[in-house]
Image: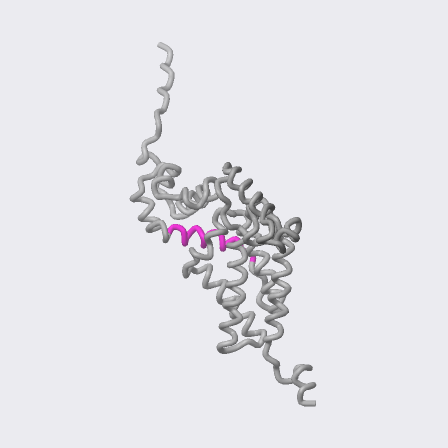
C-alpha cells in the first residue's frame, strides 16, 4: 500500500515550543512597541506574540515596569559611546547624537524612555563614562553634579519631547482642527500669526507631527552648540591655563 500522506499540523499549543529566553522576551516586547505603540505592550499581547503563557514571561522579565526597563536597556545598548579620552565637548556632542540616532529607530519608545529609565548596567556605564569625561575636563564637586544633570536632562528630555507621541495616525480631523486653530488665532495671537509660516509644525507646542515625520535636526544641533558653550563658560580654570595666567597678570 502507498504511504498515507502526513497529517496536517494543527495550531501549536503554547507549551509545544521550547523554553523561552530573556532575550526573546525583550526582543518580542520591543517588536510590539515598534509596530503597535507603547500602550500596546501587555503581558497578554506579548504572550500571544511569543506563543507563551504569561507566567513564563513574569519569570524571565518580572512585571511590566521591569520588562520596560529591560527594553530600554536593550535600546541603550545600541548607543555607540565615544572614547573617553577625547575632549569633553566632543564627547558630549557625539554621545547626544548617538543616543538620538539609536532612539530614532524606536520612536514609539523614545517618547517614554526618560520616564522609564531605571538603574541598569547600561545606564551605569553611561553614567560612569559621562562622569569620567567631565571629571577629566576639570569639573568637580557640586558643579560636576550640576553639569552632569544638565547634560542628561537636556539630551534625554529633548529626545522625549521631539518624539512625543502623535494622536492616532488616522485621526486626521484632530490635525486639521489643530492646524486651523493655529491659523485662525487672530488678534489674540498676533505674534504667532505673524510667525506661523516659520513655526507651524516645527516648534515645540506648535506641532501636530512628531519626529517620526518631522525631525528637528537643525534645532537639535543648535541646542547642542548652545549647551556646550554654556558649559564651557562654567568650566573651572586649571592652574597654568592661559585664562588663569592672564588673570594673574
**In percent of the image, x 56 and y 54: which residue is there?**
204
Position in image of residue 16 (x %, y %) = 32, 34
Number of marks present in the image shown: 0
Q: Above or below — where is 28 with respect to 12?
A: below
Q: Above or below — where is 69 with respect to 30?
A: below
**In percent of the image, x 37 and y 39: which residue is there?**
45
Task: Identify the colour scheme used.
Answer: one colour
Q: Nearer the viewer, residue 35 or 78?
A: 35
Magenta residues, start to end: 67-80
Q: Is residue 214 left or right of residue 59?
A: right
Position in image of residue 213 (x %, y %) = 58, 44
Outermost left residue: 55
Q: Is residue 68 magenta?
A: yes
Quarter of the figure that contains the N terminus: top left
**In percent of the image, x 34 and y 40: which residue is there?**
44
Q: Is residue 198 left or right of residue 154?
A: right
Amino acid at each position: 500500500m502507498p504511504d498515507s500522506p502526513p497529517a496536517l499540523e494543527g495550531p501549536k499549543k503554547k507549551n509545544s515550543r521550547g523554553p523561552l529566553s530573556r532575550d526573546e522576551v525583550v526582543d518580542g516586547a520591543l517588536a510590539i512597541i515598534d509596530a503597535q505603540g507603547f500602550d500596546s505592550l501587555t503581558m497578554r499581547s506579548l504572550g500571544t506574540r511569543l506563543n507563551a503563557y504569561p507566567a513564563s514571561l513574569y519569570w524571565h522579565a518580572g512585571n511590566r515596569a521591569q520588562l520596560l526597563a529591560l527594553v530600554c536597556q536593550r535600546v541603550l545598548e545600541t548607543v555607540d559611546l565615544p572614547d573617553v579620552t577625547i575632549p569633553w565637548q566632543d564627547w558630549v556632542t557625539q554621545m547626544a547624537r548617538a543616543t538620538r540616532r539609536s532612539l530614532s529607530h524606536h520612536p514609539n519608545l523614545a517618547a517614554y524612555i526618560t520616564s522609564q529609565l531605571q538603574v541598569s548596567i547600561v545606564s551605569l556605564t553611561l553614567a560612569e563614562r559621562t562622569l569620567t569625561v567631565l571629571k577629566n575636563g576639570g569639573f568637580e564637586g557640586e558643579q560636576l553634579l550640576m553639569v552632569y544633570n544638565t547634560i542628561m536632562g537636556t539630551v534625554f528630555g529633548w529626545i522625549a519631547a521631539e518624539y512625543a507621541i502623535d494622536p492616532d495616525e488616522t485621526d486626521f480631523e484632530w490635525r486639521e482642527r489643530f492646524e486651523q486653530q493655529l491659523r485662525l488665532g487672530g488678534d489674540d495671537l498676533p505674534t504667532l500669526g505673524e510667525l506661523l509660516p516659520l513655526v507651524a509644525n516645527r516648534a515645540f507646542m506648535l506641532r501636530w507631527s512628531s519626529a517620526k515625520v518631522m525631525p528637528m535636526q537643525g534645532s537639535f544641533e543648535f541646542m547642542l552648540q548652545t549647551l556646550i558653550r554654556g558649559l564651557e563658560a562654567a568650566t573651572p580654570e586649571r592652574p597654568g591655563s592661559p585664562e588663569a595666567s592672564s588673570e594673574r597678570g
